[in-house]
Amino acid sequence: MGLKRIERTKLLILMMVFILGVAVAFSIQKPTPYLPVLNPADIEPSVVADSLERVGSGHVVGEFNLVNQLGESVSRSDVDGKIRVVSYFFTTCPGICIDMTANLKLVQAAFLNDHRVMIMSHSATPVYDSVPVLQAYGEANGIDPQRWWLLTGDPKELNTLARTSYFTVLEEGQGWDEHSFIHTENLVLIDHKGQLRGYYDGTREDQAEMLIGHIQYLIDKQAKALSDEG
């Protein structure tokens, strides 16, 4: 015999209360998003300059003077206060750079109209990657130069930045030579203070989606801090 109407109603109410209770419990137990501030001592030593391997606090990215795909000279002052996504690549790369560019385009699309976010892709073959080459590469890949810089410049400076600021290339003896250097697939997240906040596999779409979420977390956190100050 089927349940009476009033019994069915009670059962439905009990089920709804149970589902609501589970949802509330999950919400309470769900951890608050947190991104650590990373320092050289926290990072794989093979990409860290020997002089910095023991540095465990206070690291921020250094000064730079480079040129973007529009031929504009740019420096750290141009991105101070911005959230940055940094990578190393080269325009003739037949392997991981293709996937990295595709996934960085997801990041660009997510923050296309947000001036607080800048993508910075540094050339690992700056002797070849001239301004016209970078400009052509950017146009072919739908890169907006207002949100995503393709950077070239002095090879020594690019290598020094990679080894002492961003930690994205291998040390000498592991693929580096005087003409080029072996970059990793890492995308580096840098907050508005110039601190390292995360590393992501640029060849994986799921990692790019995670990066997008973490960028939004930093934006929201910064906005809340400014609101509290006001």
Image (tube, rainbow, N blue to C red):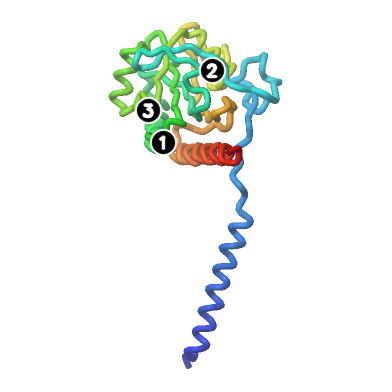
Q: Label 3: which residue?
A: 98
Which residue sits at x=63%, y=29%?
A: 38
- Estimate how packed mark 2 is, as few (under 14), some (14 to 19) or many (20 or more) residues with alpha carbons within 10 Å: many
Which residue sits at x=59%, y=57%?
A: 27
Does the residue at mark 1 contact the one at mark 3 (Cβ under 8 Å)? no
Instruction: Give the alpha-carbon distance from disc 1 to disc 3, as whole Å.
Output: 21 Å
Q: Label 1: which residue?
A: 111
- Estimate how packed mark 1 is, as few (under 14), some (14 to 19) or many (20 or more) residues with alpha carbons within 10 Å: some
Kind of residue indicated by mark 1: Phe
Relative to the observer, which residue lies in front, 198 or 182?
198
Kind of residue indicated by mark 2: Ala
Q: Label 2: which residue?
A: 162
Does the residue at mark 3 contact the one at mark 2 (Cβ under 8 Å)? no
Name the front one of labels 1 and 2: 1
Relative to the observer, which residue lies in front, 190 or 182?
190
Name the front one of labels 1 and 3: 1
- Estimate how packed mark 3 is, as few (under 14), some (14 to 19) or many (20 or more) residues with alpha carbons within 10 Å: some
Of mark 1 and mark 3, the one earlier in the sequence is 3
Name the front one of labels 3 and 2: 2
Instruction: Give the alpha-carbon distance from disc 1 to disc 2, as whole Å.
Output: 25 Å
Kind of residue indicated by mark 3: Ile
Does the residue at mark 1 contact the one at mark 2 (Cβ under 8 Å)? no
Of mark 3 and mark 2, the one earlier in the sequence is 3
Left or right side of 85 for 146? left
Q: Quadrant of residue 18?
A: bottom right
Left or right side of 38 for 168? left
Q: Is residue 125 above or below residue 212?
A: above
* Element marked by disc 1: loop
Instruction: Give the alpha-carbon distance from disc 3 to disc 2, as whole Å.
Output: 20 Å
Which residue sits at x=69%, y=25%?
A: 57
